Amino acid sequence: MFKAIRYKYNNNFSSLEARQEMVVLLFSLTPWIGLPIIDYFKFGQAIEASITNIGFLLLFGLQVHRNVTQLRIEHGKLIESEQRLRSWNADLQDEVNKRTKELEKINEQKTNNFINLVHETKTPLTLIKNYLDEYISKYGSVQELDVIKGGVDKLTADVINLFDIERFTKGIDTYKHTRISDFSAILSNSLSLFQHYCYMQQITCFVDIEDGLLIKADPNAINRIVNNIIENAIKFTDEGGQIAISLTKQEDKIVFAVKDTGDGIPTELQKKIFEPYYQIGHKNTGLQGMGLGLPIVKKVVDGLGGTIAIQSQPEVVPGTTVTITLTQHTLGSNEEIAKSGTAISKLSYEYSYDTIADSEFKAGRRTLLLIEDNITMINFLLQKLSTVYNVFCARNGAEALKKLHEITVIPDLILSDVMMDKMDGFAFARKLAEQGRYSHIPLIFLTAKSTQVDKLKGLKLGAIDFISKPFSFEELSQKIETILDSINKQQKAILSSSIAQLQTLKNLGQEGVSASSQTKFEENCKLLHFTTREIEIARLIVKGRTYKMIAKDLFISEKTVTKHIQNLFEKADVRNKIQLINKLNK
């Protein structure tokens, strides 16, 4: 025991703990050492048990003391660690708060810069729009001007949406809801335009509007609600579908509902559509906006103390119903109904209902396949490119693959957008690479998705170029011409090389074999251990005969000829007929 304690304390008995442990252990052994004395005096088992138990108690006390001491040490360390952790957490929290503030400041600065940039575009847009309208009113319009005007109108609408969503985000009131608006009149005034677009797209429109429903709200805000909700319904309803627009009174509430028979909105996305910039691209319309319409409507409805609900179960039945519930206002004696907000003369997006037709095919022209989901862009490129090339058009990758199998010619070049519904440009490139017949066709991406990552991804998928929108048509036209010329030169080079090789074989056959070369031929055949039949076949190969001709000359099958020639290649250690001829004649 003394050696064990000495080992435990590294021969250091000067510590109080070491001396205490030694004394207690010695005293705990004393009762057992004294057992012979107790037995000699016959004190009895009770005294013997009592004395021996004193030893157990001393040992137990020593163990308890050691455990308590160890627990106190560990508890102290735990408290110290907790204090350090709290200090570290406090420092970390301070650092996180500091970094968060810095990021918020940077983000706010970026947002302000972006808003300032957008703000700067409002003045030139206003000037362009007004001068363009004035020019059209004086001199009339043509297709090109209509396209320009549609683009300016869309850009103007997007700029207004950006400002509105930023104001809502910062808690700034965009509309003053102190006026009294006639919801029924505002909706009725807009119906003629919506019904026109429904008619053009062969959509049946049902209307149920209850007259005289008033609401305390800015008329422009009501216009915003009406235009966005109905426009979305038209945008995502297929040709031949139906839209039902209703405005009714339920107790003290006004219920505005728009029901369509479109693709519907999955349940898991019905909350996300109210997030700014979120889009659902499930219809190939080419009319996707910035994803700000519904978020703005939600902000307006919330500002009016109303509710907006989405009812859609596309997995059960197609279609979506958007229901907006607002509080009805009763006109007081001293109140007046405000004039309706500015009625729209067209929807925010330029609809085109013309069927896209491929250009007239003309023999001798190069052929292009154009894949683009924006109708206006397709028509523009089709009009420009069809003067020089045969142009086939598709609205997405899936439609393009189908068209490739339908047309009788293989395109010389494919121009494709990237962001498209059903099958985007990247997915199309992957599918194209799997098509043995079409995998060689060069591909150019035309897209606004032009980050370095996107470009690298496109090039890895086999694209030979990546042209960012907006682009110059002259630049695009020159690139197309250069690529097609390069392909033409490559094809000519390959053809010339093939003809030259064939000519070499023909010359060898016509010239025959001189006497000296004949001797070399025979010697080489013997050195390579050719059989008699193999020598006959080798001689005909030198003369330029084909497999079929050799089979006919020797009255054997073409399959047998092929087998013999393979044996010749193995014995001569060559891969083709030209190498065999050279080896036999050298």
Image: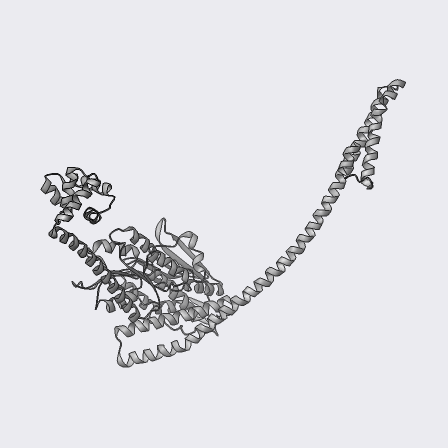
Query: Where does the image place residue 198, in percent across and percent down from the top left?
Result: 29, 63
Say if residue 122 shows up in the picture: yes
Along the line of sight, which residue is nearer the eye, 156 or 384?
Answer: 384
Say if residue 257 shows up in the picture: no
Residue found at the very far bottom of the displayed protein: 138
Query: Where does the image place residue 72, in percent across and percent down from the top left?
Result: 75, 43
Along the line of sight, which residue is nearer the eye, 501 or 435?
Answer: 501
Quadrant position of the N terminus in the picture: top right
Is residue 174 rendered to the left or right of residue 65? left
Along the line of sight, which residue is nearer the eye, 18 or 498?
Answer: 498
Establish if 467 lies above or below 436: below
Name the residue located 32 percent from the left edge and 66 percent from the top edge. 194
Query: Where does the image place residue 318, in percent across and percent down from the top left?
Result: 34, 52
Is residue 465 rendered to the left or right of residue 510? right
Query: Where does the image place residue 498, in percent across and percent down from the top left?
Result: 19, 55
Figure disc tally: 0
Establish if 571 lies above or below 115: above
Is residue 469 rendered to the left or right of residue 164? left
Q: Quadrant of residue 343?
A: bottom left
Q: How is the image coloured?
A: one colour
Q: Quadrant of residue 382?
A: bottom left
